[in-house]
Amino acid sequence: MKHPSAGSPLSRSARSRLAVAGLTILASSWLAVLIGCGSAGKGAASNPNYIQDYEARRYQQAYEGAKGAAPNLKGAAKEQALLIQGESAHALNKNPESKLILRPLTDSTDARISGQAAATLGLIYQEEGDFDDGAKFLQLASTKLDGDASARAALYAGDCLKAQGQTAEARKMYEQAQSQVRTDSSLRGMIADRLSGGSTAGVGKFSLQVGAYSTRQRAQAQADRLRQTAANLDLGSPTIVETVSKGKSLYTVRIGKFTSREAAQKAAKGLGVEATIKSD
């Protein structure tokens, strides 16, 4: 899985990368828990400006504030500032710097810090196509975090394993995610979809194509984003269909099965996204 407000300094390319990796969902949910527990350590403010900026997705301000504050902090407060600096660096398309900041934090004695750092590193590596390191860090994150956060890390670890052709190992991670999810119904649906191999509701030769991508990971991100909306409209889960165009693989995201073009057009309006009607 996985937007910033119009006032955010996040570039369009970075915003797209975040959506593909699902980082927006992960960071906002995990850091909200972490920040909610308060800051500790000498020099820690009750709610530093960089925390407020991060929560508001003002990533440039959060990055600069955390970077300036970290050298003057100690203990948990310093780690929290570094974590926000690393997260913001990634949001600003500074992956090399983000990795340098976050790697040491995976050794933190605070499981929330180490887990979030590992999760973001895993998603960065997944995004870069390094599925081996992606799986390793996301699996580590799933052991450090709990509840829905742990389940989401396990889900994306499974995706990394599947991308390497390790289908049995990927299924184990999906099953682990299924056992850990607590309250996030959308996440529960994503896990069930991975375990079932995807399904579509209805019968008919028409379907809605809502995206076409050069990689399965980008297609999966779009499918995940639209899953809840499709479910609300009783259209079933989005599916990924691999096609070949000009000798290259293309991964399309399709929703629904309809007996007529008119029915498909009506459903497209409900989805609220640009869609092309395809016939089998």
Image: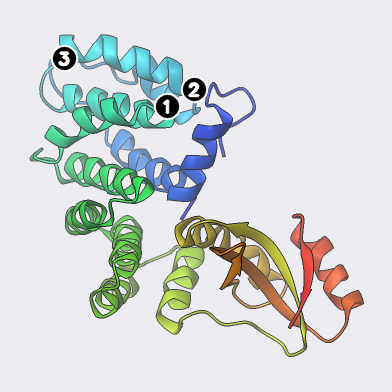
Residue extending farthest to the front is: 247
Question: Mark 2, residues whose alpha carbon is within 10 Å: few (<14), some, or many (≥20)?
Answer: many
Locate residue 277, reporting x and y percent: 80, 70
The Cα–Cα distance between marks 2 and 3, rounded to whole angstroms, is 22 Å
> Looking at the image, which residue is at 23% across and 40% down?
117
Work out whether 40 lies above or below 230.
above
Is 42 left or right of 196, judged from the image as shown? left
Query: How are the residues colored?
Result: rainbow
Q: Which residue is mark 3?
A: 73
Q: Secondary structure at mark 3?
A: loop
> Are the residues at dot 1 and dot 2 in contact (C-beta closer than 8 Å)?
yes
Q: Earlier in the sequence, mark 2 or mark 3?
A: 2
Which comes sooner in the sequence, label 1 or label 3?
A: 1
Q: Nearer the viewer, residue 247 or 177?
A: 247
Task: Identify the amino acid type marked 3.
Answer: Leu
Q: Determine whether label 2 and label 3 are within 8 Å by CB.
A: no
Q: Which residue is mark 2?
A: 58
Distance of label 1 from label 3 (alpha carbons): 18 Å
Residue at 66% of width from left, 70% of height from top?
254
Task: Name the secondary structure under disc 2.
Answer: loop
31, above or below 57, in the image = below
Residue 199: x, y in percent? Answer: 56, 82
How packed mark 3 is, by other alpha carbons closer than 10 Å (few <14, some 14-19, many 20 or more), is many
Question: As shown in the figure, which amino acid type bears the numbered disc 2?
Answer: Arg
Residue 54 numbered mark, or none: 1
